[in-house]
Image (spheres, coloured by chain):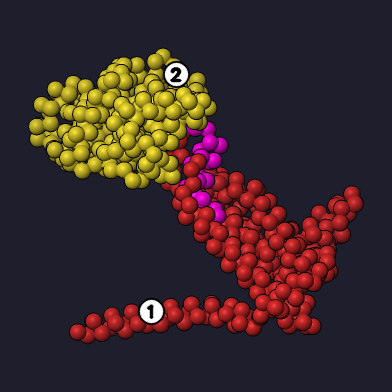
Chain colours: A red, B yellow
Amino acid sequence: MKSININRIVIAGGILAGIITVFFFILPVISLLLRCSPGIILSTVQDPFIIHAIILSLGTAFITTVVIVLFGTPLAYIQARKEYPGKDIVETILDIPIILPPAVAGIALLLLFGKKGILGFFLSEIGIQVLFTVTAIILAQLFVAGPLYVRQAKNAIVMVPVVYDQAGRTLGASSFQIIIKIILPLARKGILSGIMLTYARAVGEFGATMMIAGNIPGKTQTMPVAIYSLLQTDMDGAISIAVILVWITVIILVMVRVLSDRRQVC
Amino acid sequence: MLNVRVNKQLRDFGLQISLQVDPGEILVLFGENGAGKTSLISMISGLLEPDGGLISLNSHILYNSDSGINVPTEERNIGYVFQNYALFPHMTVEENIGFSLTCRGFLKEIIHKRVHEWLETCNLTSLAKFPVTDLSGGQQQRVALARALIINPDLMLLDEPFSALDMRTREQMRYELRDILKKSQKPAILVTHSIRDATSIGDRFLFLERGKIIREGSIEEFSHMSFEPDLHAYTCVKQ
């Protein structure tokens, strides 16, 4: 009798904790959505600078995601399937941007790509300016969001049993065919969620972007940077952009869920 | 004909094996779990590299430690049926069976024709479009066999092919497997720790213990030996 009561208390406590946690995450979003009417959003998105910020954020995040998928997937495969000296060091290096505060990442990139930086010096010598350009936004997003994709894709590949690679080899498949026809389709859910995380993180990137790309309306001002700017002068405008960001996130989440549930034929 | 003479230091013991399999012959590798049976066929298929020795198939050298030859798995043309079949779960039955032909760049019409021949041989025609995850254990085993045999392999390796089957299906599949293997006329090695599997399918047996062959002979001899008390101790199942 006593143990039944304890079980009920534990279950009730668990449900209560779950409800509190869910509300903690959803209430700020709800308060944001309640504060903003469709009319205010419509008038905000007619501002050419805001339109530019939206296009810039979505466009740079897209380029960042494509670049990191192209370069990060082979790295994720190597980290998941191959053994080599220094593998743990590479793993640790990939974790650094994830735990590094964005402001620190910004300073680090500033020192790298600044006119006196290791790379910036050579680039400026050949006439390439990185700081306060769209390229700087992409570099900041790559630095901050890229490791998330590599980590996620690596974990997804690790989850694919090695026996499928072996079966593929006995059937005459090359390493490339095994990756394309077996591993990637089987790891697609994890990889898609990695792409989603990377894109969402890149769209929302603020700290490092602010430091190396600046806040130039119509040029390098992304959506998060625009929210920060408008907070001082136009609260409704800032909320409108925040709501748009929320909707973008929701759409990405729904798209990825639909895609990963669909059976993929290789 | 397959000739094998390999050695490999495994975790708990050193494996040292010499064997020969004639065309059309089914050799049974028998022994308790961890005796080195799977390691041996992994070395033959190229999935595991021996420490030294020689492997040749139909007079082609697949591995020779002295001359540094080690033909990659994908070039050995050896059919391998894995313990749990390792069917690709994101593909249908026909996609699994035709996978090797797709990788080799065959024309779609040829792939379709050969896949359907094997679907018929293995009694799987009605299941062609089914995802392999929807099949029973016996049906999955037939898909694994068809997938391995469609490449017209020079050798078939079967690692505990009945372990995922229930008793009734197992009984039926033993005869089907022997029939399909005999029709293909390929030399085959069957790994098992079941006396019944060995006597139903094999022509000859090798008894392995801690990486060494401790007995070998015909299946008739094996049937007789399996009643000896010392050997009976090794065989956990006499089905």
Residue drawn at 79 percent across, 57 percent down: A135
Q: Quadrant of residue A251?
A: bottom right
Q: Nearer the viewer, residue A50 or A78?
A: A50
Q: Estimate the x, y position of residue B28 in percent, counting from the top left.
A: 25, 28
Disc on res. A265: none
Side (left or right) of A264 relative to A211: left
Q: Main secondary structure of the magenta part?
A: helix
Q: Estimate the x, y position of residue B50 in percent, counting from the top left.
A: 42, 30
Side (left or right) of B19 relative to A211: left
Side (left or right) of B231 relative to A203: left
Between marks 1 and 2 in the image, the one whose residue lies nearer the viewer: 1
Q: Is residue A192 a member of the stretch shown in magenta?
A: yes
Q: Which residue is mark 2?
A: B61
Callout 2: helix, strand or loop?
strand
Distance (Cα) linking label 1 and label 2:
64 Å
Q: Nearer the viewer, residue B18 or A264?
A: A264
Question: What range of the chain is rendered magenta?
Answer: A171-193
- On the same chain, marks 1 and 2? The answer is no
Residue drawn at 52 percent across, 54 percent down: A259
Amino acid beneath label 2: Ile
- The N terminus of chain B, quarter of image: top left
Q: Is residue B53 a member of the stretch shown in magenta?
A: no
Callout 1: helix, strand or loop?
helix
Q: Estimate the x, y position of residue A40 in percent, counting from the top left.
A: 71, 79
* Residue A114 in view of the camera: yes
Q: Which residue is mark 1?
A: A14
Side (left or right) of A1 relative to B92: left
From what the image shows, is residue B58 above or below residue A184?
Answer: above
Q: Counting other residues with Cα less than 10 Å from the Cα at mark 2, is it few (<14), some (14-19), or many (20 or more)?
A: some
* Residue B163 in view of the camera: no
- The C terminus of chain B, quarter of image: top left
From what the image shows, is residue A50 above or below residue B172?
Answer: below
